[in-house]
Image (tube, rainbow, N blue to C red):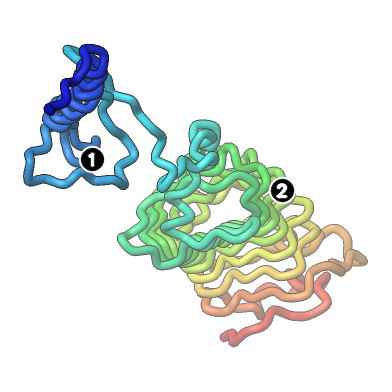
Amino acid sequence: MARTISPHKMLDLRILLFFMTVPWMFCEMARNDILVPRNRGISKITDHEELDSESSVFMEVKIGKKKIIPIPDYDSPVDADDKNLGADNEDNKELPTCLMCVCLTGSVYCEEVSPDMTAVPPLPKETAFLYARFNKITKITSKDFGDIATLRKIDLSGNLISEIEDGAFSKLNQLEELTLAENKLVKLPMLPAKLMSLNANHNLLKTKGVKANIFKKLRKLAYLYLGDNQLEAVPTLPESLRVVHLHNNNITTLTDETFCKGNDTHYIRYNMLEVRLDGNPLVLAHHPNSFICLRALPIGHYK
């Protein structure tokens, strides 16, 4: 005798079939609408494509609407220091000079720079020593060192400097040593009061390019090198001088006041240790009283 299924059991079977079929239908719909990750472009995946399970950004599928849900990429975190880049802009302005030159604590070395350096580069703050030798700098302006009051030594030897503006060194109250040797200077600028050493050997200086009292006011100047120029006379020298080199110029005459005090035969110039006048059209024997106050006669070979 055949068994019959009661209406209640038939209803239970239909409900079970419904719950098994509906999920399968939604899976098929979702399969056709899944989108690829951000780093592969926005396009649908076909039946032959594989979904990248390592993606960090996916699309949330909704009927009639698609919304991008960004998830941070923890594989490449943002450096916290990057947030402070704007605040460091002032310091970064000094970087190009230190890439072109060598910057150590308080010192900048810009020697034989390539490509050619034709002007003084911007210096880092608190620079005390600048060595910019053997370049092709042609001019020194009043702005080159205007805001670097900490400079104590500047060496610009072996350049092509033919002009220095009067205010170029006037604000350098700490400057003690200035070297301008082997340039093309025809005139000396105003010099800072605390200068102790000036080297302007091998230039084109003439007496008219050196102001009468330019050195007399420098009460700490101890070393003055003006050899291999075109000076016609000895400039006024401060009492503080220990060494003065005036060799290979066009000096033809001296007076009793050049180094000594003609009206004071007891005056001794104790600070002056070395004078050099060789290579000038000058006969020392014609000026016996010009050196009477010195502790030693001028060095070098004379006629």
Q: Which residue is drawn at 22% across and 22% down?
A: 13
Q: Name the residue under label 2.
A: 174
Residue type at mark 2 is Gln
Q: Where is residue 187 in the image (x, y as percent from the top left)?
A: 48, 50
Q: Which residue is drawn at 53% across and 48% down?
A: 123
Task: Give x and y (percent) for residue 30.
Answer: 18, 27
Q: Is mark 1 on a helix, strand or loop?
A: helix
* Quarter residue 204 falls in: bottom left
Earlier in the chain: of badge 2 and badge 1, it is: 1
Amino acid found under the numbered disc labelled 1? Asn
Q: Quadrant of residue 301?
A: bottom right
Q: In this view, does 169 lie to the left or right of 250?
A: right
Nearer to me, 221 or 285: 221
Above/below status of 161 relative to 114: above
For residue 230, say whether it is visible: no
Q: Tell me the tag on residue 39.
A: 1
- Residue at (64, 76) in percent of width and height: 276
Mark 2 crowdedness (10 Å alpha carbons): few <14, some 14-19, many ≥20: some
Which residue is nearer to you in this view: 28 or 16?
16
